[in-house]
Image (cartoon, helix red, strand yellow):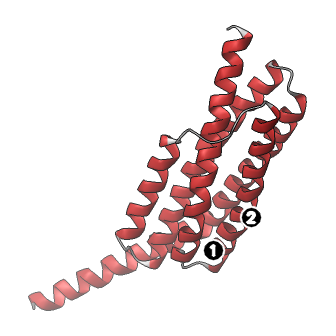
Amino acid sequence: MKLNSLRHLYVEELKDLYSAENQLLKALPKMAKASTSEELRAGFEAHLKQTKEHVTRLEKIVKALGESPTGKKCKGMEGLIKEGGEMIEEDPGPEELDAGLISAAQRVEHYEMAGYGCVATYAKLLGESEAESLLRETLEEERDTDKKLTQLSGHINVEAANSGETNETHARSKKAAAGR
């Protein structure tokens, strides 16, 4: 790949991430508000602060290249956020909602990790060492967030499973009582 074409791809991918992060800035407060677990809500609020820093880093990197970070819409993030919003609108029980929010958030984190991993590699190949360092820092923060979500899912998913069993048992008891 020619250096010029790699630079073009690099800038386009940075703009895509910038759009993704800005979309996430709007979605995270909704996810925090929808969550019933205080621990999950706090995690979303902490990630919102972190996401603001990610936006600032991307602005710095893109402006250092003499480009504008705007002008591109990340359709991948748009789709992930839409899916998460649809799940919230289905109005599941509290435990199922929190489990679903974690699932949606982890999809977002994995999408971001893929994007940041690629642009960090591009930055390295293009000799953009400061940008590479900032992008790798963001990548590590995204990985840490994913790990925290995995830890939360350990007990939230169990609660959702137990709640589902309780609801099914209750429904079977009700049905059996009605049949008598």
Cα distance in 3D space between marks 1 and 2: 13 Å
Helix, strand or loop at label 2? It is helix
Between residue 157 and residue 76, name the one nearer to us. 76
Helix, strand or loop at label 1? It is helix
Image position of 33 with respect to 132: above or below: below
Numbered badge on residue 49: 2
Image position of 115 with respect to 93: above or below: above
Q: Residue at x 71, y 31 (%)?
A: 119
Looking at the rendered structure, the kind of residue marked 2 is: Lys
Quadrant position of residue 179: bottom left
Between residue 91 and residue 16, name the one nearer to us. 16
Chain-order first, disc 1 or disc 2: 1
| Residue 81 in sight here | yes
Q: Residue at x 77, y 51 (%)?
A: 56
| Neighbour tally class for label 2: few under 14, some 14-19, many 20 plus, Cα within 10 Å | few
Looking at the rendered structure, the kind of residue marked 1 is: Arg
